[in-house]
Image: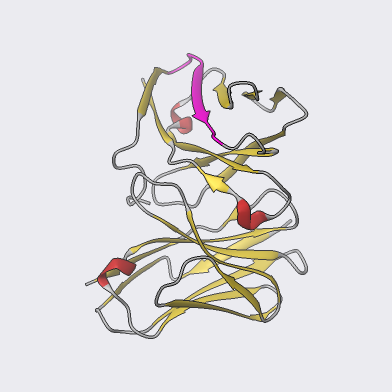
Amino acid sequence: SQTIHQWPATLVQPVGSPLSLECTVEGTSNPNLYWYRQAAGRGLQLLFYSVGIGQISSEVPQNLSASRPQDRQFILSSKKLLLSDSGFYLCAWSAGEPQYFGPGTRLLVL
Amino acid sequence: GESVGLHLPTLSVQEGDNSIINCAYSNSASDYFIWYKQESGKGPQFIIDIRSNMDKRQGQRVTVLLNKTVKHLSLQIAATQPGDSAVYFCAETPDNYGQNFVFGPGTRLSVLP
């Protein structure tokens, strides 16, 4: 069966510091991968998606970036965090439909 | 996580009763729909899906109903249990591309003992 992992589970970072969140998927090959941010009382906001190694599409211009160095690894990064980057970040995978989500990372920028 | 659902509509039901959670969508071209369950501090969990060529689909204790005429989707949970307490949200897409999913804000289900 397929599983999806995210780490860290919780992260507290100062403003201006770098960020690296990692997501890995097991049990499937060439999945579509997604990064979402979830804000209170609102639907999930798609940040990035990838259909293959090295292929990244950005949905929202911001100070975040994503990379896919391996087939089942998806990384969300920032060079300098802003206060507004605080939130709950979710990674998801799909092989068509539906999307399956990871456990999420709660990021608090102080 | 605690960042989800701070100001969401809430549905409170007695344990053992049936629950009905509703979702309205706006895109008449939406072709595929999903219901997710999200417990506090966790990622969303897939519950059930339905395509636009169907109007009803049943799973274990759950039923999804789709009314394309009024663009309405509902999730029915039979014999609601304390473990069903969570935020439930729907997702829709007009095509097979995952990047085009639109997610609703969700409804918080509270099961009363």
Q: Is residue A63 left or right of residue B52?
A: left
Question: x, y percentage for residue A86?
Answer: 31, 65
Question: In the image, what residue occupies the spot 57% across and 65% down?
Answer: A5
The front one of A36 and B31 is B31
Q: Please identify the quarter of the rendering in which residue A88 is found.
A: bottom left
Question: In the image, what residue occupies the spot 48% across and 24% down?
Answer: B81
Placement of B79 over or under A104, stated as above or below: above
> Is B73 in the magenta?
no
> Is B25 in the magenta?
yes
Placement of B88 over or under A72, stated as above or below: above
What span is colored magenta in the figure? B15-26
Question: x, y percentage for residue A45?
Answer: 47, 56
The front one of B63 and A79 is A79
Image quadrant where one finds the C terminus of chain B: top left
Question: In the image, what residue occupies the spot 52% across and 67% down?
Answer: A6
Q: Is residue B72 left or right of residue B68?
A: left
Protein image colouring: secondary structure
Question: In the image, what residue occupies the spot 68% across and 73% down?
Answer: A72
Q: How many marks?
A: 0
Which residue in the rendered view is the most extreme toward the front?
Answer: B28
Question: x, y percentage for residue A33?
Answer: 64, 65
Placement of B100 over or under B33, stated as above or below: below
Q: Is residue A59 left or right of residue B5?
A: right
Question: x, y percentage for residue A43?
Answer: 44, 47
Which residue in the rendered view is the most extreme toward the top?
Answer: B17
